[in-house]
Structure formats: C-alpha cells, structure tokens
Image (cartoon, grey):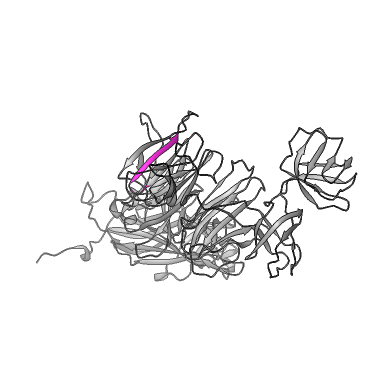
C-alpha cells in the first residue's frame, strides 16, 4: 500500500515551459495539444469545428475574411477571398456565392465597414493593396423564376425590408399621392421610394423628390388611381449599376418595380433561386492598402502600395509609400482627397518614418488609433479643435512592434514582436502617461521561439486569445493556433487548426482556413471537426504533465530527504467525466523518458451493456497490463450526457526519481474531462542500479 499520495486537482496553470520541466508547478503541462482547460478547472479535448456552407475541395487558402454587419438591411454577411475571387455567404441560400472575380491571387484583403456617410447607407470597404479600393452595400436577393433571355430580370425583392409608412391614397396623379389622414413633416421622405401595393400599378416604385404634410411627390409613373394603397420604402440597390447573378455580370439601367431590374440581356440564362447581388464600386484614386480600421468618422488605411499626394509645387502626383497612413474625410470613408493647403475635415496622408519598413497594422484604441510597424509603435489622434483638425502623432516604442496583424481584445491589443514575444499593449496605470508593453508569452518562450509568426492573426473569444501561426519557417501557411486563457492567465497549448483570419458571425467565432478556401466555426458543441452531416473527423488530443519530482515526506535514515532519492510508484487514481463511447489512454512515464512505463485504457463502450447498467467498474477497464484490476465507481448520465467517474488502480512498484502523467484520446464523438489525478508512492524504496553512475 502507498503511504504518500500526490493528489493533483489544479490544471489551470496550463502549459509551462519557462523553467526546467522538473521544477515547473505540479499540475502544469509540458505537452498540451488539442486540449483545453475546462470550466471545472480540469482538462479535456478542445471543442469541435464545423464548415460554414458547402465544403470547397480547392487547395488554395483564404486571403481574407470579414463579417459585414449591416444596419440598413439588418443582416450579417460574411465575406471571404481566395484565389482572386471575393465571395459572400448568402443568408437565404446558406452557401457561398461570387461577389466579384479578377483580383490578384494570393493578395491579402483588408476589410472594414463604415456606417457614417452622406449617402445614408452603410458599406463594406475593402482593398488588397493591388486592385482598387472598393465598397459594397451588401444588397442581396435571388431570382424569382428562371431567366432565359430578355431585358427584365425578376427577383425576390429590390427593396430593403423595413416599411417606413403605409396608407391609402385620397387622390393621385402620375407624380403625386395625397393622403389627407397624414401629418408628415416636410421633406421627411425625400430620397426614399413610394411602392404602390394595390390596383393595376401594384409593385411599381418611384423615387420621392418632395413631400408635405399630406402628399408625396415622386418621379413620373402611370397614375395608380385614388384608393390605391402604398408604402414608403428604401431601395436596396442603386438606381443603376452592375449585378452579379451567380457568376455572371449583368448591367441594369433601372429598377422599375419592387421585384424587377431593367437589364441588358447577358446572353445566358439563370435558374430559379440564383444568387443576385450588386457588384462593388471602385475608387481608383484612393489608397491601395490592406490594413483598414475605423477611427470615429474616418477610415484609416495602412500598408499602402500606392496613393495620391502633392509635390512641393502643389501638383497632385502618385505616391508609393507603405510606410505612411492615409485617412479619409470626416463622414466619408470613400473620399481621401485633400487640397495642397489641407483644410478641416479633409482626408490626408501622414508619414511614419520611424522604425523603418512597412506598416504592419492599424487599430483604434480608446479615443486614439495605434500604428504598428515591425520595430515601432505610434499612438495617433486628431486635434479636438475643429479649426485645426491636425493629426497628433505620439511615439510609444522604438525597436519594438508587431510583425503582422494585431489582435484587438475587449480592453487591450495583443501582438507578436520580431523576437517572438506574445505581447500586450497594457492599459495606462498609475503615473504612466502612455500604454506600456507587457510580455504575456514568457512562460512558453522555449516553444514559441521555434514558431514562425510572419503571418500571425488572432482573435479574442470566450475568455481566450487565439494566435494562428506557423509551426516553423518551413511551413507555407499557418497550421496551428496558440491558445491563451485570459481568465486563468495560462496557455492552453496548441490547437492544430489552419487559420488565416478570424471574425464573429451571429455571436460565434469563425476562422478562414489558410490551406483551403473554407470558413469554419470554432467552439462547437460537436466533438469533431465536421465538414458535412456525413463527413467528420475525430480530434486527437494529448496532455503530458511536467516532470514531478518524487520526494518522500520522511526517511528512516535522513531527517531531510534527498532530492536524488529513488521512489516506488504503485498507485494511480483518476476522477472526471466521460461520455458514452469515449476511450481515454492514461500513461505513466518515468525518469525523463517519453516511453511509457505503464499504459492502460479507460472508457465507456457501447458493447459494455452490463457496465452501462451500473455493474462494477473493474470488469470493464479493457486490456490492462499485468492483469491490473481497478476499483471505482461511475454515475448515471448528467444533464449534458456525461458520466462522473472515479477509480484507483494498484500495480507492482515502478521505481523512479521523476514521473510524468500522460492523457491521450482520439476518435469521433469523443468527449471527456479529467478533474483530478493521484500518484501513490512507497515510503521504503530500492535503489536502482540504473541510476548509479560508475567512475572508471
């Protein structure tokens, strides 16, 4: 029997590699892959993933991903880029559809919405630092009926869903509707559209040019007649432009009704239910950059490969400066123009000469925005004096910056430095007048020193910060995610997932695959990596404790025990939760060798009918070495479907100075949580000749 039991029930210290493994805190890990720290403070396999839309088997990775949150149409529309094609996730077809093609393959896109402008609309702005800076309204619909040929394309709707006013006309003409029951404010509907909803002109729309208390004036249509009902609506598409129907460009000249476009015959047909959207509008004179962020009512653009500026004589010329930031006019993210003698509210350009190299990212931070280079950080803001509107640039750090994208957390900004520090731009504290940098990655420095962060991206979600990177400089794309648990201030190790961008969609975290064009959801309740209803892959998870130095509480021959004492291990105990069909492999390693000295499986298998009915645990441990017989118990299923287990096993003494516990699992539909383990050791030991060095 054991007289010394090491009882470990604290796993929240996570992965720790700074100190020598045998000196690290008990309960910390030296290997932690595809694992997470659970809410109970235990450890278990990471959550699953699932593909958004239909799986795309192409082997070209994603070059951009962003969730466009529209206010005017009340939708969230994910947008992705891959192999020179922009696609959007259609909210009714529930799959990816083409927005526009012809972009430079492999060029990374930056995307950001901007909701404040004189158009009374919200837009998604984007650029890949190659093609023109562009914007998209997010207008989406589908064809209503098959189109064969002709000049009329029928769709589900050309209008935004909101109805601003309804009524029944008292009198009408070709350009007016009068409704004596109304008391409107003068001009309150100018720019909106009237929709006739009854009579021979039902479905016809026309732009409102004026209104008074009881009448609407609009562009000429056929007189709908007194008594016709109407609505005041907003057009979802521009009055003219170019549509993308499936993958075909279709030019239209008018929007005569709530369900039709007047088009130029494209010469091809479309099936019923084909995706329809407006093509983006391009701005050739705007800066071509791919680091975009909002700052109050402006758009900030960094990593600009070309833009416009003035020479010393006041002449407008082209400018190639990816070490400068461009900022738009107030209230208009599509206008970056400024005069030679810049005035208040105009756009502009600001050089960032310090640090050398290009701008790696820009990010708003409280009432300022931060500009990052590889070896420089700057904090900028505009003067609050309206007549001045000058950019105030404050250097924060020299010889210290971000190698690529930064991760904007809820109250901080995280980034990776050139020397592979996982670093935070800390909040202002005490007497500090500017934010200070704090290294949070020191505890796993020996591991991350081997990684390549040249294309790092990340996101904060569920009290975790995720950093996607390459496992080495030889990797072509990001192939792993470092997970930092903010609540426990610990690293949860490595998740082997490919990611080139992250964003939230409908409150859930999604990642763009760096190896394929697919977008997948993280933190799913399914314990698999799922491609479809019938195709899923199990998660292979592994945890190894840091080496535990076995020192007895007392010795017959020594008051103070020796740190070189050899101990006998004869007991192991585990507690946690497990779901039906899951098998966990436990292992015991000794004396700094990763070859297990003892391995056994524990699981609840469907064929173990007696076990499922509450038979003794010992009868259903699987194949165990040396005929080991465990003792323990297991509960009925909890509300989440898991069962609580607790067991202990005894075995002949295994002599060692250091031990490490391993926990492994692999397969589909597997889930477990280990919340406690114990190790029993002998008080009296036999010295092993293998640990005695002879001098000759």
When asked about the image quadrant of residue 179, the answer is top right
| Residue that sits furthest to the left in the current view | 696
- 224 in magenta: no
Magenta-highlighted stretch: main secondary structure? strand
Residue at point 90%, 44% (across, down): 226
Residue found 86% across the figure and 35% down from its top: 181
The image quadrant where one finds the C terminus is bottom left
Q: Position of residue 305 (x, y in %)?
A: 42, 53
Asked if the stretch drawn in magenta spans residue 374, the answer is yes
| Quarter placement of the N terminus | bottom left
Left of 612 or right of it: where is 145? right
Residue 380, percent across and down?
42, 37
Front residue of 88/466: it is 88
**In the rendering, at what x and y percent does residue 624 appear?**
43, 69
Where residue 543 sits, quadrant-wise, is bottom left
Residue 617 position in % (x across, y down): 51, 63
**Image point (45%, 45%), residue name:** 326
Up the image or down, 208 lies above or below 527; here it is above
Which range is magenta? 373-382
- Examine the rendering and report whether any part of residue 270 can be seen: yes
Q: Is residue 638 visible?
A: no
């Amino acid at each position: 029997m054991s007289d010394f039991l090491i009882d470990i029930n604290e796993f929240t210290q996570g992965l720790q590699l700074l100190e020598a493994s045998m000196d690290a805190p008990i309960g910390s890990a030296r290997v932690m892959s595809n694992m997470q720290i659970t809410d109970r403070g235990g450890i278990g396999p990471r959550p699953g993933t699932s593909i958004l839309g239909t799986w795309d088997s192409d082997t070209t990775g994603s070059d951009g991903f962003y969730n466009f949150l529209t206010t005017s149409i009340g939708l969230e529309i994910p947008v992705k880029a891959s192999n020179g094609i922009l696609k959007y996730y259609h909210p009714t077809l529930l799959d990816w559809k083409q927005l526009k093609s012809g972009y430079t393959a492999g060029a990374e896109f930056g995307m950001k919405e901007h909701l404040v402008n004189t158009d009374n609309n919200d837009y998604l702005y984007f650029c890949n630092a190659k093609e023109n800076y562009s914007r998209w309204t997010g207008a989406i619909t589908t064809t209503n009926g098959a189109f064969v040929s002709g000049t009329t394309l029928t769709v589900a709707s050309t209008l935004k869903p909101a109805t601003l006013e309804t009524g029944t006309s008292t009198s009408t003409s070709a350009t007016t509707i009068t409704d004596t029951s109304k008391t409107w404010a003068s001009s309150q509907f100018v720019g909106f559209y009237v929709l006739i909803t009854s009579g021979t002109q039902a479905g016809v729309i026309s732009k409102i040019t004026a209104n008074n208390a009881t009448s609407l004036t609009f562009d000429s249509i056929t007189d709908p007649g007194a008594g016709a009902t109407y609505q005041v609506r907003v057009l979802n598409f521009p009055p003219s432009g170019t549509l993308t129907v499936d993958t075909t460009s279709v030019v239209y000249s008018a929007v005569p009704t709530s369900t039709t476009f007047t088009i130029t015959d494209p010469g091809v047909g479309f099936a019923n239910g084909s995706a329809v959207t407006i093509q983006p509008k391009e701005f050739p004179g705007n800066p071509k950059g791919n680091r975009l962020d909002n700052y109050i009512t402006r758009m900030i653009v960094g990593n600009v490969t070309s833009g416009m500026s003035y020479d010393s004589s006041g002449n407008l010329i082209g400018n190639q400066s990816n070490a400068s930031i461009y900022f738009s006019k107030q209230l208009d993210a599509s206008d970056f123009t400024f005069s030679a003698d810049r005035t208040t509210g105009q756009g502009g350009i600001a050089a960032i000469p310090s640090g050398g190299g290009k701008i790696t990212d820009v990010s708003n931070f409280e009432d300022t925005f931060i500009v990052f280079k590889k070896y420089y950080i700057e904090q900028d803001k505009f003067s609050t004096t309206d007549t001045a509107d000058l950019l105030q640039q404050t250097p924060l750090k020299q010889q210290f910056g971000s190698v690529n994208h930064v991760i904007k957390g809820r109250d901080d900004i995280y980034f990776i430095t050139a020397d592979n520090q996982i670093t935070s731009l800390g909040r202002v504290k005490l007497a500090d007048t500017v934010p200070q940098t704090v290294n949070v990655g020191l505890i796993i420095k020996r591991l991350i020193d081997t990684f390549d962060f040249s294309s790092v991206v990340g996101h904060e979600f569920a009290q975790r910060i995720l950093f996607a990177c390459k496992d080495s400089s030889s990797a072509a794309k990001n192939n792993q995610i470092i997970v930092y648990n903010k609540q426990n201030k610990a690293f949860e190790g490595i998740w082997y997932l490919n990611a080139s961008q992250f964003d939230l969609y409908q409150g859930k975290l999604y990642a763009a695959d760096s190896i394929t064009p697919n977008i997948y959801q993280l933190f799913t309740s399914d314990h698999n990596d799922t491609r479809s209803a019938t195709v899923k892959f199990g998660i292979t998870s592994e945890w190894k404790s840091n080496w535990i130095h076995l020192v007895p509480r007392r010795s017959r021959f020594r008051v103070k025990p020796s740190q070189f004492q050899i101990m006998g291990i004869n007991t192991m105990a585990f507690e946690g939760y497990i779901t039906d069909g899951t098998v966990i492999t436990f292992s015991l390693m000794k004396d700094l060798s990763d070859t297990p000295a003892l391995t056994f499986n524990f699981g609840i298998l469907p064929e173990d009918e007696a076990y499922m009915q509450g038979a003794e645990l010992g009868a259903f441990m699987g194949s165990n070495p040396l005929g080991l017989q465990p003792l323990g118990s297991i509960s009925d299923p909890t509300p989440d479907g898991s069962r609580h287990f607790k067991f202990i096993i005894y075995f002949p003494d295994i002599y060692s100075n250091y031990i490490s516990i391993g926990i492994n699992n692999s397969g589909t539909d597997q889930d477990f949580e280990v919340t406690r383990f114990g190790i029993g050791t002998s008080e009296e030991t036999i010295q092993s000749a293998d640990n005695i060095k002879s001098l000759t």
